[in-house]
Amino acid sequence: QSVLTQPPSASGTPGQRVTISCSGSNSNIGTNYVYWYQQLPGTAPKLLIFRNNQRPSGVPDRFSGSKSGTSASLAISGLRSEDEAEYYCGVWDDSLSGFVVFGGGTKLTVL
Amino acid sequence: QVQLVQSGAEVKKPGASVMVSCKASGYTVTDNYVHWVRQAPGQGLEWMGWINPKSGVANHAQRFQGRVAMIRDTSINTVYMELNSLKSDDTAVYYCARDRTTTEHPYFYAGMDVWGQGTTVAVSS
């Protein structure tokens, strides 16, 4: 069971907007930046969002991130079939001697 | 282009050790911190630790303390992860990933922007 809680699945039809949540605590999301990763089937993860809401170059502006308190969200607008993937939130946790923690992942299905 | 290229798949017996290499190209490996992350079959991502390739200092996740070593060979732009006393539940794909934080600064998690292709390690008797 991960320190960060994500819904195991989400779905939408092409063109729709979907959101994926990530819930944590004061020691992680509450005090540190949230990062989002996209993992297409059979490939390595890819950084999608950094510092809560910033997009690396090359990531479409259909992807956006937000954070409030101890929760964060990833929103995907104008859903496309190629967005079907697993999505993970990742955060630094200040407890113990500090560590990176990932959410359990959300499998996004484009119907 | 900037990339991390990992060594090939390994099959090991319980109790053995495995070493996975991660060679940087397109950038100097001592410029950024590097993480190791693993993913068991059908499971999520699990952080194992980071190494500062410039100093050699590493920080391991508590559950791997005493069983993992992260080292580097700067002459060949490569970092390594060695995991000892392998068990069947160490079967996973192991990834190295570059942190956006440069080694000019104290460690601060800034996200993993370049990932290796992954190395499958299977542990079976």
Image: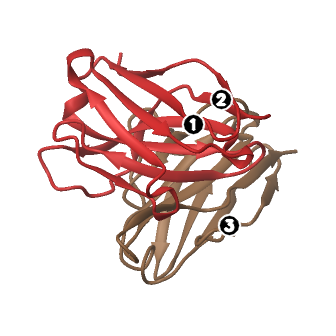
Chain colours: A brown, B red
On screen, residue A48 versus residue B101, left or right, reads right
Residue under numbered circle 1: B94
Q: Percent from the top left, x then y, of residue A18?
A: 70, 58
Helix or strand or loop: what does disc 2 sit on? Answer: strand
Q: Tell me the kind of residue under disc 1.
A: Tyr
Q: Tell me the kind of residue under disc 3.
A: Gln
Helix or strand or loop: what does disc 1 sit on? Answer: strand
Residue B102: assigned label: none
Q: Return the chain for callout 1.
A: B
Q: Are marks 1 and 2 in contact (CB under 8 Å)?
A: yes
Between disc 3 and disc 1, the foreground one is 1
Residue under numbered circle 2: B120
Q: Percent from the top left, x then y, of residue A37?
A: 55, 47
Between disc 3 and disc 2, the foreground one is 2
Q: Residues within 10 Å of mark 3 (few under 14, many from 20)?
A: many
Q: Are marks 3 and 1 in contact (CB under 8 Å)?
A: no
Q: Is B55 rendered above or below residue A106? A: above
Q: Percent from the top left, x then y, of residue B39?
A: 64, 44
